[in-house]
Image: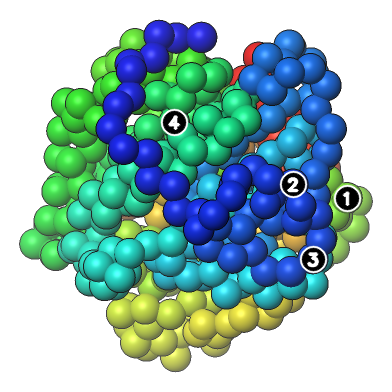
Amino acid sequence: MRDRRATSGRILVEAAAGSLLAVAQRAGMTGAAMQTETPLTASATVPGAPGTATPGQRKRVLVIAYAFSPVLGSEYRQAWETVGYLARRHDVTVLFGDSDAIMGGFDHFDAHAARHRLDFAAVKVPATPLQQRLAGVMLRMPWALLFPLLLRSWHARAFRQAEALHAEQPFDVVHQLGPIGFRNPGYGWRLDCHSYWGPIGGAQFVDTGMIRNKWSVYHLEALLRNLSVRLQARSGYIAKAARGFDRLSFATVENAAYFARHFGRTGPIISDQGLHADALPRRTGTGDARPLRVVWAGSLTPRKNVAALIDVIRKAPGSVQFDVVGDGPLLAQLSDVAAAHPNVTVHGRLSRIDVMAVLAAADVILLTSLSEANTAILFEGLENGCIPIAPAINGFVSTLNDHVGFLIPQGDPDRAVAATVAALVALGDPVTRDRYRAALADHLPSLSWERLGMAHEAQYD
């Protein structure tokens, strides 16, 4: 265990009366968790004294995950799946602040908890009215760059709650699980127990050379983002956490390199998105000679490099069928392109069920983003057996390889488009398509939520 800096000051206990832990232990039943006063749990017996578990034993684990939802995807799903795995093997308490994509929103969680017995204690750390108002403003660009400041204030409240719970019955491990972004480390490392932060993401740069219009607003935003990532290396808040946590893990190779360079810390690469092992596809050996079907899905914004998608559509063989799913400011531009290309269908915004249906009928998931960690749409495509074509950046190079898909070199927009079109031409051959599908099917178990949960659990000793 690394040395802890002594923490002082008033501990804010938000329970109206009685022990928080005692309430949690009595709540092994269905029903919505109340605010921080009423954790919900399915309690279990812990061998050994609290806070003294040895390697391999069942442990008392405190997970801090701002975004936590049984319904939403991305970070919400990552936290939910990870806690679900851990709760089968340990006694888990989770502190969270958002299940609805709204700071302080808990409706999705409450609806689920009312119908299901939970295997973990769920403790809400609600936002203050001021935090909720500011969150609505900051999430509109360019104020989204300031949202980590708001999350820092939420983490301070969450840590006071963690201190109160730890004082009543010590935890063996505190796991800072989310938000994934490296700007949001929280204060869990100060708790007097084994501490772990991961997976860490967000410490990555936009390749501005891939932006054709250097006078665009997005080019300026990308420059500011890159500058912000560089400057964050000087943040005392981040540096103390990076050096204070006992263990770290990283969502991508790029994030690991950033922390090694600036903070002298290393750790394993653990994806922040995963797959369900019992639903992994094996779409192999079909010999299907029908036209190649490609899905591109995401927000129609400059960061997703819609310009590259349009170039690919214009230069790809007319036999390639494109399904474009998403909405955003560039929808009208893309719709104009689709009007001139009968092989392109623009679906607009779809429900997740409908998105999965489109993916199930496709052969390829195409990504063109300028900056991406482990985006959920990639994993949804993989769940449906889609062969990935993605930029050789960020999470893609940590998750994929050239045997299971196509990683497109970046740096030059024209060459990237040409390489993407060449990949589509290659996959037009059914034999080539089946070879990639077979390799992908062998690769996917390494990305299962269970494997990822085991990787996190290995950091608890």
Residue at horizontal 67%, vertical 51%? 23
Task: Tell whether label 3 touches label 2 (CB within 8 Å).
Answer: no
Type of amino acid under label 1: Asp
Disc ID at residue 188: 4
- Mark 3 is surrounded, within 10 Å at the Cα level, by few (under 14), some (14 to 19) or many (20 or more) other residues, namely some
- Mark 1 is surrounded, within 10 Å at the Cα level, by few (under 14), some (14 to 19) or many (20 or more) other residues, namely few
Which residue is situated farthest in the left direction here? 215
Measured as percent of width and height from the top left, residue 237 is found at: 25, 30
> Can I make out residue 60 in this image?
yes
Instruction: Name the colour scheme.
Output: rainbow
Which residue is situated farthest in the bottom direction here? 339
Residue at horizontal 33%, vertical 16%? 5
Measured as percent of width and height from the top left, residue 399 is found at: 59, 37
- Mark 4 is surrounded, within 10 Å at the Cα level, by few (under 14), some (14 to 19) or many (20 or more) other residues, namely many
Mark in the foreground, 1 or 4: 4
Left or right: 60 as drawn, with respect to 235: right
> Can I make out residue 426 in this image?
no
Measured as percent of width and height from the top left, residue 453 is found at: 71, 35
Q: Reading the chain from its start, which is encountered first: label 3 or label 1?
A: 3
Type of amino acid under label 2: Gln
Which residue is situated farthest in the front direction here? 17
Disc ID at residue 278: 1
Q: Secondary structure at mark 1?
A: helix
**How many labels sit on residues?**
4
Indicate whether 32 appears above or below 280: below
Residue at label 2? Answer: 25
Type of amino acid under label 3: Thr
Q: Reading the chain from its start, which is encountered first: label 4 or label 3?
A: 3
Residue at label 3? Answer: 30
